[in-house]
Amino acid sequence: MRVIVLGAGVIGAATAYYLARDGHQVTLVDRHEGVAREASYANGGQLSYSYVAPLADPGVWTKLAPWLLSPTSPVRFRPQLDPLQWRWCLQFLAACTSARSAETTRHLLRLGHASRRLMDDLLALEPALDFAYVKSGKLVVYRDTASLVSAGRQVDYQSRLLGDGDHRQQVLDAAACVAIEPALEHIRREIVGGVHTPSEDTADCYRFSMALVDRMRAVSSENVCLFDTVIERLRVSGRQIVGVDTRNGRLQADAYVLAGGCDSPRLVRPLRMSLPIYPLKGYSLTAPIADANAAPTLSVTDFQRKIVYARIDGHLRAAGIADIVGYDRAIKRQRMATLIAEARAVFPGAVDYRQVEAWTGLRPATPSGRPILGRTPYANLWLNVGHGALGFTLSLASGRAVADLIGGQPPFVALDGLTLPGLAR
Ligand SMILES: Cc1cc2nc3c(=O)[nH]c(=O)nc-3n(C[C@H](O)[C@H](O)[C@H](O)COP(=O)(O)OP(=O)(O)OC[C@H]3O[C@@H](n4cnc5c(N)ncnc54)[C@H](O)[C@@H]3O)c2cc1C
């Protein structure tokens, strides 16, 4: 079958890779000059299969006031004249209940663990893939007792759901956190403890996406990338997509996969489809490690500050901040300064903080934090969108499941709770 994948971020790349492996003829389209130039470029680098807790949880209600008022808070809201933003925020608040958060966790864990299995398969099948992959393990640290207690409950909930198996999570006190990650010494007195998950990984999402696309092209010369190609609209006839108009002309295929990140809703709005996806703008810094003892070897998440740290190929990557400020892709000096100050406070000697590479990206977020996969009202249009803060982590399972559906197979992982409402897989 001829399949066009719309968008070459990590989600489009993973989908294209599996489609090519299944023998389809794949065309991957993107407006940039290469793969993964938007949200998938310099993200946190965490493959966080077991730590999938959504942003929308009941704890949000007590944090709302500081988030709205403090200029250095990890979340910022700037109202826009955009009904989509308001609708998204209301849906987000509606998702901030214990029941919804637990339900989302359950669905994301299923997809996360399926991704971990696929990553193992991929590494076995393609040992030459080079994307700075490390089985680093992950430590989430907490700065107040209430959050740590709540994290402990989450660990219990997850182990009841999954059984302990190989993916055990352990609650540690502050001293034990510093013992397994000595680079945290500087904030020893500020943290009360953490959750350690030895089976989480880190890697470079940009290089991962490029590697998958290289493999896609290696499968057959009929698999191609069309870069510098702006998608303008999808053409429909009845309940079928019959082509894609781009600035470089019309493209046609038998099936189409939408993987356009936070621009996906705009592409399908003319088709009377409404996708509840809005950008959550984040920032990252990357710098060569100056003192190996001062930089973390585990991937570390500072829960209260909402910042993740990873060591990627001799560099420290710190990523965080979730600003609900529309589609503005500019790097705001003040927000970048907040991220640098936070990183410097946690790992002061790790890098030269005057020499960091600054980056911003828009997470394609749904209010609940669940991606939307699979079927649409159009028989040959498929969705792989809305992965929010976990797109790198969930890319393989999402790509595999959508490729299964296009091939007429049941998806290898159940997609309940992860589809467009009203459209079972
Ligand atoms: C600061 C930050 C830190 C993060 N950290 C992590 C992490 O540690 N672990 C993790 O799992 N996830 C993380 N994420 C989330 C992850 O990066 C995203 O979920 C993921 O990159 C989304 O991938 P995507 O392919 O859906 O979107 P994108 O990477 O944005 O790709 C969409 C593509 O569609 C193309 N496109 C859209 N519209 C058009 C059009 N009209 N014409 C042509 N092309 C079009 C775009 O050019 C783009 O290349 C982080 C995100 C941010 C911002």
Image (spheres, grey):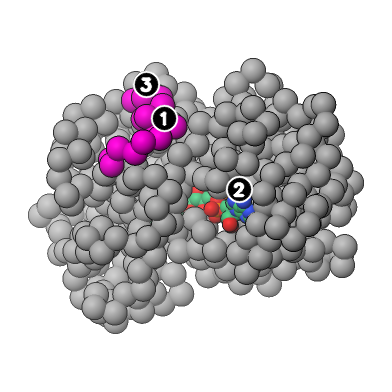
Q: Nearer the viewer, mark 2 or mark 1?
A: 1
Residue farthest to the bottom, as pictured: 290
Q: Distance between the Cα atoms at labels 2 and 3?
A: 26 Å
Label 2 packing within 10 angstroms: few (<14), some (14-19), many (20+):
many
Counting from the top left corner in percent of width and height, residue 335 is at: 25, 58
Q: Residues within 10 Å of mark 3 (few under 14, many from 20)?
A: some
Q: Which residue is mark 1?
A: 83
Which residue is tagged 3? 94
Q: Amino acid at mark 1?
A: Pro
Asked whether, in this view, residue 193 is left or right of residue 241, the answer is left
**Is the C terminus in the top left, top right, bottom left or bottom right quadrant?**
top right
The range drawn in magenta is: 77-93
The residue that label 2 is drawn on is: 260
Q: Position of residue 253 (x, y in %)?
A: 85, 47
The earlier-in-sequence mark between 2 and 3 is: 3
Instruction: Point out residue 206 in the picture as x, y percentages from the top left corner.
Output: 55, 65
Q: Are marks 2 and 1 in contact (CB under 8 Å)?
A: no
Nearer the N terminus, badge 2 or badge 1? Answer: 1
Q: Residue at x 39, y 19 (%)?
A: 99
Question: Is 281 left or right of 148, judged from the image as shown?
Answer: right
| Residue 37 lies in the magenta stretch | no
Which image quadrant for residue 97? top left
Give the camera-side residue of 402 and 222: 222
